[in-house]
Amino acid sequence: MELNDIYDKDRNLTGRIHRRGTKWKPGEYGLVVCVWIYDGKGNLLMTRRAPQKSFPGTWENSGGAARAGETSRQAIRRELFEETGIRAEEVDFEFLRTTRDHHAFYDHYCLRSQVSLEQVVLQPGETDDVKWVSHAEVHEMIRRKEICQIIAQQFLEEEPTLQKRQTAQE
């Protein structure tokens, strides 16, 4: 059973805990983290969602819900490792922005890594494939609806910032 901290609309901890899979009450928010891994050569690391997940077979960046007691950076470090086997220190994640929807705050990060695909360890039941793709390939994947809409929207909003990171590394 996964437990998550409950935040108010201003992102203050309420001291209450939410059990994953139960409905959020009005005014309650969780914390979700996500990271774009870039290689400094114009490519992004994408994983494919396992068949038993929501949006099965679609491609995404790594991320997930913060557990109760975790900070945003602790959560992104854990999620990245769980989904890919990639280890990074909390300070290595570059914070991009926070967004909010009906019941969650989303902390967006990026991380420079040149991990080889052979080093990636996929998490059974979570991810079943991985690949490096160019920004142009991501746009084509969006056009073909191979990326779920929320991830596609995040990419389009964050692409200018990600492109700056890529060119700064070349």
Image: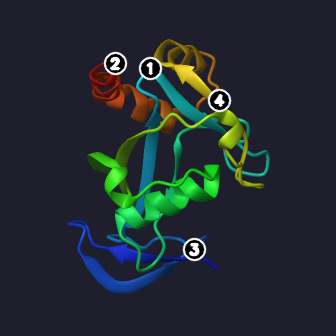
Residue ID for mark 3: 22
Q: Nearer the viewer, mark 1 or mark 3?
A: 1
Quadrant (top left, top right, bottom left, bottom right) of the N terminus: bottom right
Residue ID for mark 1: 41
Residue located at (23% from left, 74% from top): 12
Residue ID for mark 4: 131
Residue 82 picture quarter: bottom right
For label 4, count other residues whose C-alpha is less than 10 Å away and answer few (under 14), some (14-19) or many (20+): some
Residues at marks 1 and 3, CA–CA distance in whole angstroms:
42 Å
Q: Nearer the viewer, mark 4 or mark 2?
A: 2
Q: Nearer the viewer, mark 4 or mark 1?
A: 1
Residue type at numbered disc 1: Lys
For numbered disc 2, what is the local secondary structure? loop
For label 1, count other residues whose C-alpha is less than 10 Å away and answer few (under 14), some (14-19) or many (20+): some
Residue type at numbered disc 3: Thr
User: Do labels 2 and 1 touch, CB within 8 Å?
Assistant: yes
Query: Given the current orientation, which residue lies at the most extreme bottom position?
Result: 15
Residue located at (59% from left, 20% from top): 141
Residues at marks 2 and 1, CA–CA distance in whole angstroms:
7 Å
Which of the two discs, 4 and 3, labels the residue nearer the N terminus?
A: 3
Residue type at numbered disc 4: Lys
Residue ID for mark 2: 170
Q: Which of 130/103 is in front?
A: 130
Residues at marks 4 and 3, CA–CA distance in whole angstroms:
33 Å
Residue 51 horizontal side relative to residue 169, left or right: right
Residue type at numbered disc 2: Glu
For label 2, count other residues whose C-alpha is less than 10 Å away and answer few (under 14), some (14-19) or many (20+): few
Query: Can you give x and y, in whole percent of width and height, for residue 35 in the image?
Result: 44, 45
